[in-house]
Image (spheres, rainbow, N blue to C red):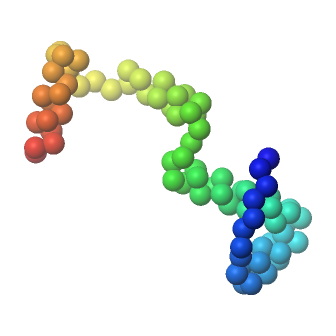
Amino acid sequence: MIRTQVQLTEEQYAALKAVSAAEGVSGAELIRMALDRLLETRGATDLKDRTERAIAVAGKFRSGLGDLAEQHDEYFAASVLH
């Protein structure tokens, strides 16, 4: 792990200490958990997770177009203009 320093307001520190005592979890662990939750909601997932999700949806959709691979630029340009 990498050690870092974070400055909190007095109110944030008091709340962190209260939650830490109530949950029986260190303040550092609570901060790590909060950061993990923030990153999840922002879509900042790791490469392995993104790769697995991409593989899971590959081939699940159909365009109905027989020449999509060759003409994708034209189809994309047309969709942006509409």
20 on left or right of 80: right
Whether residue 65 appears in this view of the structure is no
Up-down relation of residue 9 to residue 53 (above or below):
below
Q: Measured from the top left, where is residue 37 in percent x and y?
A: 63, 55
Q: Is residue 13 visible?
A: yes
Q: Which residue lies furthest to the bottom in this view?
A: 10
Q: Residue at x 79, y 55 (%)?
A: 3
Residue 60 x, y percent position in the rendering:
38, 24
Q: What is the x, y in percent for residue 31?
A: 73, 62
- 41 w.r.t. 27: above or below: above
- Horizontal side, residue 40 vs residue 61: left or right: right
53 relative position to 1: left or right: left
Q: Which of the 4 image quarters holds residue 6?
A: bottom right
At horizontal 20% and vertical 20% (from top left) the residue drawn is 68
From the viewer's perspective, is residue 2 above or below residue 66?
below
Q: How many marks?
A: 0
Identify the residue at image location x=79%, y=47%.
1
Q: Position of residue 69 (x, y in %)?
A: 23, 18
Q: Nearer the viewer, residue 45 or 55?
A: 45
Give the position of the C terminus as an image quadrant. top left
